[in-house]
Amino acid sequence: MPETHLRNDSLPAPAAAGLRERYIYIACPWTPVGGGMFKVADYLIQSQPPAGPAAAQLRPLDTRGGAHAVFSLWVLLTALAKLVRGRLEGGLAGVHVNMGERLSLLRKGTIVVVCRALGIPVVLHLHAQMRPFYRRLPPALQRLTRWVFSLPASVVVIGGAARRFVTHELGVPAERVEIVINGVPEPVEPRRAAADGGKQRVLFVGRLCEAKGVSDLLAALAQPGFDRERLEVALAGGGDIAAYRAQAHSLGIEGFVRFEGWCDQAKIARLMAASDVLVLPSHDEVLPLVVLEALAHGVAVVCTPVGEIPAVLADGVNAYFVMPGNVAALAAGLQEVLGRPELLEALGRNGHALFRRQFSLQRFCANIARIHQRHFGIAAQLEPAAPLAGENAP
């Protein structure tokens, strides 16, 4: 594989000799505005134990901030200054760049280019379903995107569809593209015990918008066949809450539907532990962390088979699939899962078993550490029990 960056041993000798700590920057928006990308990066930071003498420390590198987009330019310039300082002082071993689409491509592309100029090795982690956005770009911007993706030592993707896009359309050699499926932590909240005749709780987590199928969900809940006396539905997330609350009122479902607004990680964990079903009727996704979190909690999942979801979940085994935009099918699917206790229990049990096999945070961190070790020459300290399992597949 051709070298696309300077080797770590090319650091200035005095700096390397006197170095007390090596570190790796994890670059992304370090606020909830970063969505699932931020959660993945934050899980990495949270999970690392104290760095040993032969290990690196993972440090956050904010590339956007949480304020207006204009302010993000200052945050980006600050991040670039940290890169220069890290290179000159010799402690920076590499940068793990988490990229989405739209302005994320511009900001993270700038990080990648500057790292290349400074001789800092980069791993680029693609979190978005970028193909539709890329195909709408003018030819000149498509060429620029392909050039940016040619610079990192490795491109990490979440599944096979993203790998095919990166290799076939962006032209990244297959040997430089690695699949790593996201992981989530073990639940910290005790699971609510099912109670015969008690409330049935359905949870939606995500930004309240049309792409997430929120209007479809509200319309489905207004369909006949639900036991409204027993049903409780919580929608947790930011977005146009007032508009969706008005829609729920017009549909006559406000009596059993509540809007929690934006929730922090601890509150989401409490809501998840108290729920029977997670519903995510998205029109477009990659592999949502909230689905993996539901599997970790043993919560039955009703979702659409979009993005990488059908590649890792099996309909009727560890999830119940409904087609995006089909309100009647969504209502029928929710009613079937809620109305068949044996199906509800089987989906939760099988989903939790799948989490144990494939989606644990230990597994995810071990795979990221393996990539960092290969391209940066150093990685974060791992818990001793973390399995070193690869995710690469054509």
Image (cartoon, rainbow, N blue to C red):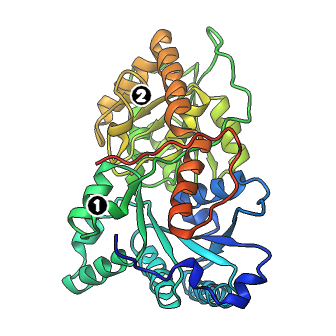
Taking 321 as reference, is 337 left or right? right
Write the residue at 25% across / 79% down: 142
- Please tell me how crowded label 2 is: few (under 14), some (14-19), or many (20+) other residues with Cα within 10 Å: many
Residue at 48% from the left image edge and 9% from the top image edge: 342
Name the one closer to the observer, 263 or 350. Answer: 350
Residue 371 x %, y %: 51, 59
Q: CA distance from mark 2 to mark 1?
A: 31 Å
Quarter of the image containing the N terminus?
bottom left
Q: Nearer the viewer, residue 129 or 222?
A: 129
Answer left or right for 312 relative to 297: left
Tell me which amino acid carries mark 1.
Answer: Ala
Residue identifier under label 2: 319
Task: Report the residue at 71% width, 45% height from top.
Answer: 383
Q: Position of residue 26 (x, y in %)?
A: 60, 68
> Is residue 66 visible in the rendered structure shown here?
no
Q: Position of residue 30 (x, y in %)?
A: 64, 68
Mark 1: few, some, or many residues within 10 Å (few <14, many ≥20)? some
Q: Quadrant of residue 5?
A: bottom left
The residue wearing badge 1 is: 174
Q: Which residue is rendered at x = 53% and y = 24% of the image?
A: 353
Q: Where 191 falls versus 17 (above or below)?
A: above
Element assignment for label 1: helix
> Looking at numbered disc 2 in the image, what kind of residue is underneath it?
Ala
Mark identifier at residue 357: none
Q: Residue 326's image quarter?
A: top left
Q: Quadrant of residue 150?
A: bottom left
Residue 207, percent from left and from top: 51, 54
Callout 2 touching callout 1 (CB < 8 Å): no
Q: Is residue 20 above or below residue 282?
A: below
Residue 269 relative to residue 306: left or right: right
